[in-house]
Image (spheres, rainbow, N blue to C red):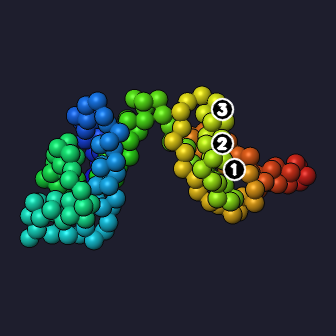
Amino acid sequence: MAEIATIARPYAEALFKAAGTDPAALSQQVQALAAVAAQPQLLQFADDPKVEPAQVAQVITSVIGTTLSPAASNLLDLVIQNGRLAALPEIATQFHALVNASSGVSDAIVYSAFPIDAPALADVVAVLERRFQRKLNAQVVVDPELIGGIRVVVGDEVLDTSVKARLEQMRVALTA
């Protein structure tokens, strides 16, 4: 079977072209579709030969609870008809990457030993945007093992100023 990323790429690119002037709004709906499509019970239901594609689409839209845009609805129908429902999470990931690339934004995961309140996060993001030279969408993940400081992951770049990393550097220096 083909790699899931290879299967998802044409769908994500076509959806990006169909998104028009506001792909960010469509991105939220595609993420919601992907979250539902990632459920093993739904995939098992969709694979049942007795279940019609319209029933699968109806179950997914009822779980989401909002009216889908025409582009999102067409994507859902297309992946169900083509038997590619399992690829929907990867389609959403690739679509989100295309939206970010077109707007010059990158996703950043900020690992912190403690929760960061909104004003402090805004200050951290401002410093990180200067450091990485691009606008960032930051998400905070609390990781008590860091002891203190933060660890930031932006794409394949990592900035680790945590106490844990500094202690590890000291350990390596002392044992070398």
The mark that comes first in sequence, 3 or 2, is 2
Determine which residue is flagged by label 3.
131
The picture places residue 86, in percent across and down from the top left corner, at: 28, 57
- Which residue occupies the foreground of this view, 137 or 101? 137
Name the outermost residue toward the right.
174
Around disc 3, counting alpha carbons within 10 Å, would you say few (fewer than 14), some (14 to 19), or many (20 or more)? few
CA gap, disc 3 to disc 1? Answer: 14 Å
Q: Earlier in the sequence, mark 3 or mark 1?
A: 3
Specify the amino acid type for callout 2. Val
- The quarter of the picture where residue 43 lies is bottom left
How many angstroms separate mark 1 from mark 2 (CA)?
10 Å
In the picture, measured across the screen, residue 112 lies left or right of residue 169, that is left
Q: Mark 1–mark 2 contact, CB under 8 Å?
A: yes
- Which image quadrant is residue 45 in? bottom left
Residue denoted by label 1 = 150
- Residue at image position (30%, 49%) is 30
Q: Residue at x 24, y 56 (%)?
A: 66
Looking at the image, do the residues carrying marks 3 and 1 touch, with CB atoms under 8 Å apart?
A: no
Per the image, label 2 sits on a secondary structure element best described as helix
Disc 3 is placed on an element classified as helix
| Amino acid at the residue labelled 1 | Ile
Relative horizontal placement of residue 101, taking residue 142 as reference (left or right): left
Please provide percent x and percent y for residue 131.
66, 32
Residue identifier under label 2: 124
* Position in image of residue 127 (x %, y %): 67, 36
Q: CA separation, marks 3 and 2?
A: 10 Å
Residue 152's spot in the image, x, y percent? 63, 45
Residue at 43%, 35% in the rendered image: 100
Residue 32 left/right relative to 70: right
